[in-house]
Image (spheres, rainbow, N blue to C red):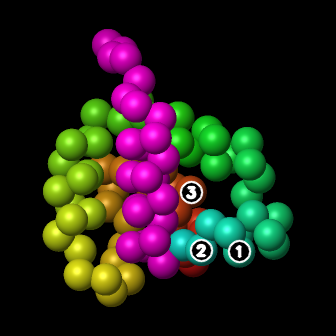
Amino acid sequence: MTHPLGDIRHHFLLAQSMAKVTGVDLIHAMHEGHISQETWANAVTRCRGCDWAEPCEAWLAAQNGSKVAVPPNCANAELFQRLAG
């Protein structure tokens, strides 16, 4: 069953926060050609449709600034794991 996509700005910030806490430098990844703008846009769209968005916010808020592993519930776990590696 599908549900409406979440607010684009909110999920842009969630995805950006997830990248940050997992040690992914999105600007560097784009500059180096590891991801395209289209890949990033698709990541935000996946986040917008993710069923784990509310728990994700709580998980992100609980992080203390040190680099952590991408939670498997993240709709973009594969992308962030690849970029963090």
Give me the disc on residue 79.
Answer: 3
Q: Residue furthest front?
A: 9
Q: Secondary structure at mark 2?
A: loop
Label count reads 3
Residues shaded magenta:
1-23
Q: CA distance from mark 1 to mark 3?
A: 14 Å
Which amino acid does the dot numbered 3 rest on?
A: Leu
- Residue 32 belongs to the span the image colors magenta: no
Q: CA distance from mark 3 to mark 2?
A: 12 Å
Q: CA distance from mark 2 to mark 1?
A: 5 Å
Residue 83 in percent (x, y) is at 60, 69
Residue 58 in percent (x, y) is at 17, 56
Label 3: how many residues lie within 10 Å, few (<14), some (14-19) or many (20+)? some
Q: Can I make out residue 81 in this image?
A: yes
Which amino acid does the dot numbered 1 rest on?
A: His
Q: Is residue 30 left or right of residue 55?
A: right
- Residue 12 belongs to the span the image colors magenta: yes
- Give the label, 1 or 3, closer to the camera: 1
Q: Quadrant of the N terminus?
A: top left
To which residue does mark 2 refer?
A: 25
To which residue does mark 1 refer?
A: 28
Q: Find out whether the residues at labels 2 and 1 contact each other: C-beta distance under 8 Å.
A: yes
Q: Is residue 29 left or right of residue 12?
A: right
Closest to the observer, 12 or 70: 12
